[in-house]
Amino acid sequence: MSGCSWGLPNMATMSVMVLLLLSIVRVTALPLHTNGRWIVNESEKRVKLACVNWASHLDTSVAEGLSHQPLDVISKGIKSMGFNCVRLTWPLLLLTNDSFASIKVRHSLHNLGLLQSISGIQANNPSIIDLPLIKAYQTVVKSLGDMDLMVILDNHVTQPGWCCSNSDGNGFFGDQYFDPDLWLMGLTKMATLFNGVTNVVGMSLRNELRGPRQNLNDWYRYMPKGAEVVHAANSNVLVILSGLNFDTDLSFITNQPVKLTFNGKLVFEEHWYSFSDSQAWTLENPNQVCGQVTSSFVRNSGFLLDQGWPLFVSEFGLDLRGKNMNQNRFFNCFMAVAAELDLDWAYWTLSGSYYIRQGVVDVDETFGILNGNWSQVRNTSFLQRISAIQHPFQGPGLLESEPYKVIFHPLRGLCVLSKSLHEPLKMGPCSNSDGWEYTPQNILLLKGTKFCLQGEGEGKQVKLGTTCSGPESTWEMISDSKMHLSYNVNNNGSTSSVCLDVDANNIVVTNSCKCISKVNTCDPASQWFKLVDRSTTSSDHVLAELSAMLETDDREEGWVVIGSSSSTDTFRLQGVQGMEFLKICPKKLPRPSFSCRALQSLFLSSFK
């Protein structure tokens, strides 16, 4: 559609190809199941959920945005932005009240006086405007599936409308609009409706349990029942359980694990916003707050990863106009945690606007990835930033290498890269990152070499060097955030600390350490670095290996790089049939940094 520029990739037509999924695992070999803390596909490869929320639970019960753009344009746009799944919300009434479910989209909007939205959907989605609400919902799911996007069905509320408050009647079992038996019936019907729809990979049982009625006895009475009825109706989907207090507390699982009759499908979900901690990010020292909220997150839900359960942060977000200091500081900390723990997640929200929200028509959504008329990305730098956590850093079945660390910069969403001894260290895509080793002596070594990270003094560029025993090569993690990498500088007999930093040109430098004291008026984000564990091969390393194949291959045909994006590097092996690949790979790569068999499986998957 004219006027819509979401940065869709223009990829060449390919005959035989290998998709090296270094960022987002292509949706194949569904359904999904769990393997310890990981979500994996039928080939036992990790599938990292890098999702966006798409609201379809508000007053109209129609997926937002269809008055602004054609459905297929929205679905393609989601894919082009690097997301691999959508958490699609729905109100319980849609599955428990046949009269409501059969209302036409046109009539639902007309009943709310939304004449302009009717005209918009008529123009952009004429095939949807006269569908019953439930059929319109199914059409959205199919469109997402056509773009190879996974879907998680999220029961957000009972009565259609904005969520959430402690007193809206939708909060907990026994509330005015939350009849447990009706809820179980609705879950059963929804699971049954999408049984056999392969891109529907999970069901979130209820959004943000809350309010004065919430208690553990009823949680353990009803949530396992919900899981059981969903699994009985559709054994393919992941069953996703939320906690208490607006889905910020799962700490009770420590003492009383959930007992189900089935295995391999249980996932827990958590929500994390800046307002969970009020105005702490602006009233207190950001280093201290980040340390405190990270510890709280681990106590309330992050511990589940260590216990072998997948954890899905199904909502987080911020005002993308970039003016809210409290939210901006929160998000710097969130990015560090999301990378360090390699979390599965869903950003709130895709929606640039709503048909109607709390009685106000065409409300602009400042958290929305898209702008108000759904024609462009609201904040392109933010989209680039979260691309760093859209790909898996580790997990089973990927193009694996020996474990190493990347030096991740949450503020930029980039990692430290080193091209040569003669060039400055720069920030760049984490998919191209070098591997680092952080020794017990606090030395950062370029993995597999004798080169280490060395400081040159305050205000100067950092370099690689071979003298790795001095103070200029000893990097200590300091501050409550555990994200300042500092070393000691001797100035005329006095010693002071300087910290790793990034300048305006993305060059890695050192400067005086920020916000180490208790003041709250400074922002340390440019000096926050997180050492993140990684066990997947970087795209640069794979390119080098494949280049070696090209250079030494005596065939007329060879590997040809034909395109790349933030989520894939795409190659064609001309003239080579699928089963021939096993003969070529080991000969050309006697000691590859990635598995020939893993690469072969991706090669063969291109024929499916």
Image: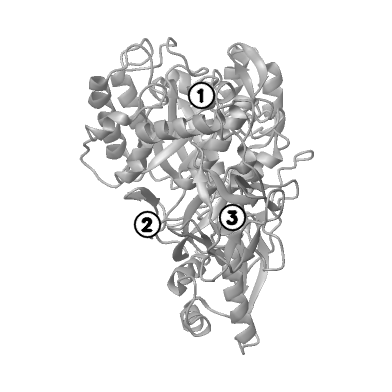
Q: Which mark is residue 57?
A: 1
Separation (CA) of disc 3 from disc 2: 27 Å
Q: Residue at x 49, y 85 (%)?
A: 587
Amino acid carrying label 1: it is His
Check disc 3 and report the residue beneath it: 430
Q: Residue at x 27, y 38 (%)?
A: 232
Q: Position of residue 309 (x, y in %)?
A: 32, 43
Element type at marker 3? Answer: helix
Amino acid carrying label 3: it is Cys
Q: Position of residue 29 (x, y in %)?
A: 42, 57
Q: Which of the image's four quarters has the N terminus? A: top right
| Residue 207 can be seen, yes or no | yes
Amino acid carrying label 2: it is Glu
Q: Which comes before the other along the chain, label 1 or label 2?
A: 2
Give 380 or 227, whichever is nearer the viewer: 380
Separation (CA) of disc 3 from disc 1: 36 Å
Check disc 2 and report the residue beneath it: 42
| Residue 568 can be seen, yes or no | no
Element type at marker 2? Answer: loop
Q: Which comes before the other along the chain, label 3 or label 1?
A: 1
Q: Are marks 3 and 2 in contact (CB under 8 Å)?
A: no
